[in-house]
Image (spheres, helix red, strand yellow):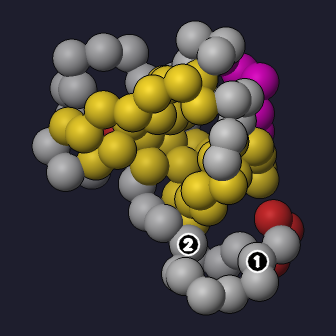
């Protein structure tokens, strides 16, 4: 649903089961417009420089100029490893 919305800015990719690990985010990526990541890959972003909240979603901006939209957050309180996040 989020991939079909207009957020007024280009979205680089969409993160599912995202983990906020300052100064970066980690998560499962879909819809990468740069072609760097395969669908469903576990990634970590470059350093986060800012965030916008649009239509109930968080859009994180990175030092590399990317915009990652968080579709869902990983459940809290778990010791999560990147390749063991299920959604």
Please report the residue visible at 76 percent of the width from the left and 77 percent of the height from the top: 80
Label for residue 74? Answer: 2
- One can see residue 28 in this view: no
Residue 65 x, y percent position in the rendering:
58, 11
Find out whether residue 58 is within the magenta segment: no
Q: Secondary structure at mark 1?
A: loop
Please report the residue visible at 69 percent of the width from the left and 29 percent of the height from the top: 47
Q: CA distance from mark 1 to mark 2?
A: 8 Å
Q: Nearer the viewer, residue 60 or 36?
A: 60
Q: Which residue is mark 1?
A: 80
Q: Secondary structure at mark 2?
A: loop
Question: Are circles 1 and 2 on residues that touch, CB within 8 Å?
Answer: yes
Does 66 appear above or below 26? Answer: above
Please report the residue visible at 71 percent of the width from the left and 74 percent of the height from the top: 85
Residue 59 x, y percent position in the rendering:
38, 36
Q: Which residues are drawn in magenta?
A: 33-39
Find out whether residue 36 is within the magenta segment: yes
Residue 36 x, y percent position in the rendering:
77, 24
By secondary structure, the bulk of the magenta-drawn segment is best described as loop
Snapshot quadrant of residue 24: top right
């Amino acid at each position: 649903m989020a991939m079909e919305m207009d957020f007024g800015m280009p979205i680089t990719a969409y993160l599912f089961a995202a983990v906020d690990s300052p100064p970066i985010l980690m998560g499962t990526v879909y819809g990468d417009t740069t072609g760097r990541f395969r669908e469903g890959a576990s990634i970590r972003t470059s350093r986060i420089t800012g965030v916008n909240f649009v239509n109930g979603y968080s859009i994180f901006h990175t030092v590399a100029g990317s915009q990652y939209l968080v579709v869902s957050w990983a459940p809290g309180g778990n010791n999560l490893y990147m390749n063991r996040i299920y959604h």
